[in-house]
Image (cartoon, coloured by chain):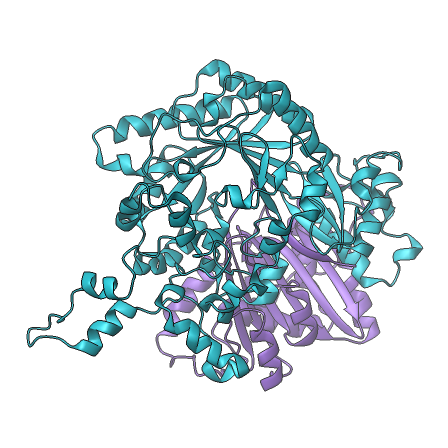
Amino acid sequence: MKIISERKGFQADHSSTSYEFLAIDRKLGKLEKTAVSNLSSRANPTSSRVSFIYNGDYSDLPGGWEPLMEKYYDAMYSESYDWWTLAIAFHADKKTAEKIKSYAFTGTDDSGVSVEEEGGRVTIRIVCRLDASSLFARSRGRHSEYDDEDDGEEEISCRDPLLKLLAVNREYLKKGDCRLLYGIWLEYDDQDDDESALPETEMTSLPAPIKNLLSMFDQI
Amino acid sequence: MENVSNTERLFLANEVRLRAEHFGALVFDRRDGTILEVDRQGFGLLLQARTAGICLDDPQFEKVKDTVCFIDRLRNIRILEKGGRRIDPADELESLTPRNSAPWLSAPETVHWAVTYRCGMKCPDCYASRIKVSGRELDTAEAKKMIEKLAEWNVFQLAVGGGEPLERKDIAELVKYAASCGLIVHLTTGRQFINADLLNEFAGSLTSLQLGIHADWRQTPDWHSYLHDLETLIARAADNGIKTGANLCLSRSTLKNFGLLVGELGNIGFRRFTLLRYKPPHSIKRWRTELPEREQLLKLKPELEKLSAIPGVDLRLDCALSFLQSDLTSPVAAEHGIIGCSAGNRIAAIAPDGSLYPCSQLVTPELCTGNVYSDSPDKIWHDSKILRQYRDFRNKKGFTGSHCSFCTAKKFCGGCRAFAHDALGGDPGCPAPAKVPLQQCGTKGRKRKDACRSAKHSGYDAVRDLQDSIGYTNWGFPYVTEEQASEWLGLNDCDYPEWIISLNDREYL
């Protein structure tokens, strides 16, 4: 069952959509890079990174970002019209997966956290408003001291500050530390009832990476 | 997006229409014009959503990942809603039953109807003035009858144009009638004044008003007052709930000041820009002057990317400009429903007398497929050999021998038939055919070579090549002028399509 095509009509709202992917646990081989590059003639995947930028509603990532996270990448962010999607994926045991799932929620508008688990691989999707300008500004200041990274084989400690931050937060989540997700719920939850409350989580003395990421979430 | 729990029932949104097709169905959202193609299974599910509703926790969807994704995506774009409709399964069965198994659409999605060819404007770049078919116009009663037929045929949208459609006294009556029959109606005009009473009459019936921009007036002292008039018209149309858009014909002069022009139009309130490729006008002399240079078209793409990145700007491309999207990959193009030329497929054109043509550019007595007013549109659509030719143009001789047939984008571009010398083959006006490496041509390599040999069917600069081969003076001037070389190569008509020349017997050269 599928949608063969979707054409926006007479009220189409053109914006650009960008996607940044990072592979952490496993580098992409030649065949995998070819498969990714087939998605866009402008994509130039390296063994751990790929970017896609689409302008206009006539072009977007075919099939969405999810299949890429299932198969190749471990962290992703996408920005479209000031809305951000952050995604983190990893293999987890059943207990950790269940714990993470308990932090899923739907907040104001489209915001929230959803968790998919398939074959032991957990994919966390965070839909949010984000102000990452200070992060990118800080990062640009530091970049001048590095060599050009377009050699195609950069390390996991990639230059993209947001991907880097997601990668570090991923390590906490892999260990079952869900303070990031709880912090997002505190930011976006719009329910007053206790039923929708997430498991109480201690939020004092947060590690810097979690604190930094949470500080970028904008209220809706 | 509304929050929907897995236990709530979702229905097809009230404003969404389904139309059975050979691959499944077309889903048309009347609120924003979005069109989806869904497969047969998806169509089955939407039929269920239309009558009984669907529920995500329904056991039949369990563990069927595709189904959940399908529903989720349709819910995100509000095709499925909590407050949708419950329809008696017996209703609208006409559009929900495939009419035949032919591998083309059961009807066009959009019909372009030139309600009249009359117009007092005499715009030099207007293509309508070269059209030489019957000027007879259906009267009001006949036109209404034809509108009923289009609605029964399950056409989604009616694009009313001309000539100048506002020349018809009954235009508001026709627009209202078409809307009452369930068609989404758009109207294109070259006028900047529309009186308040007429706009009031359009209110509630006309979805959008496309204003043909007289960009050639930009060099005149009247330009600023013209912009002021347009600004007033945009505001009045908005007061009546009518959206407006700017139609920009990309002539050489327009492209010279494209950025400035779009900026000026944006400043007076335009957000939607429909870009139209410069098509052969009545005068070959004018064509020679205003046909854009190849470099101008090549520079257009980055400009469009910048423009489309501006929040709120809605940019549309005429299908003759598909070459601007030629760097898409086939899967991306397919996912976005980009098929290039859609003459006789998604679109069809109707002349003022009700006769049907593959597209509004291809209106000649030879390409008339029948008359929608007097005959069955369904029968014309399925039986016409002319329409079949256009649906299958990529396999026709004129195309397979052309440069377009070797382009990597041929599946989702293919050029515009109005530019082809035989009105069916390759497009000699494409500024940048995406050439495939020779080793990939395989057995077709020779054909490609032949195709490239013909300057008229390629992007290759034969004039420059000839000048290079004859040589240059010590001062760098070619021994043969561009004009002389063009004459020797038979390129003096700047690729003005031969089918139009033969049609008019060069009567206005």
Q: Nearer the viewer, residue B391 or A79?
A: B391
Residue at image coords 28%, 26%: B225
Location of residue B15 with respect to B346 vertically, above or below: above
**Residue B345 point in image, percent of width and height:** 62, 50
Residue at image coords 62%, 61%: B334
Residue at the top extreme?
A: B197
- For the C terminus of chain B, the image quarter is top left
B202 to the left or right of B3: left
Q: Nearer the viewer, residue B198 or B372?
A: B372
**Residue B387 point in image, percent of width and height:** 61, 50
- Tell me if I can see residue B257 in this picture: no
- For the N terminus of chain B, the image quarter is top right
**Residue B508 point in image, percent of width and height:** 30, 41
Residue at image coords 59%, 59%: A214
B71 to the left or right of A24: right
Chain letter for purple, please. Answer: A
Q: Quadrant of residue B226?
A: top left
Chain letter for cyan, please. Answer: B
**Residue B266 point in image, percent of width and height:** 38, 38
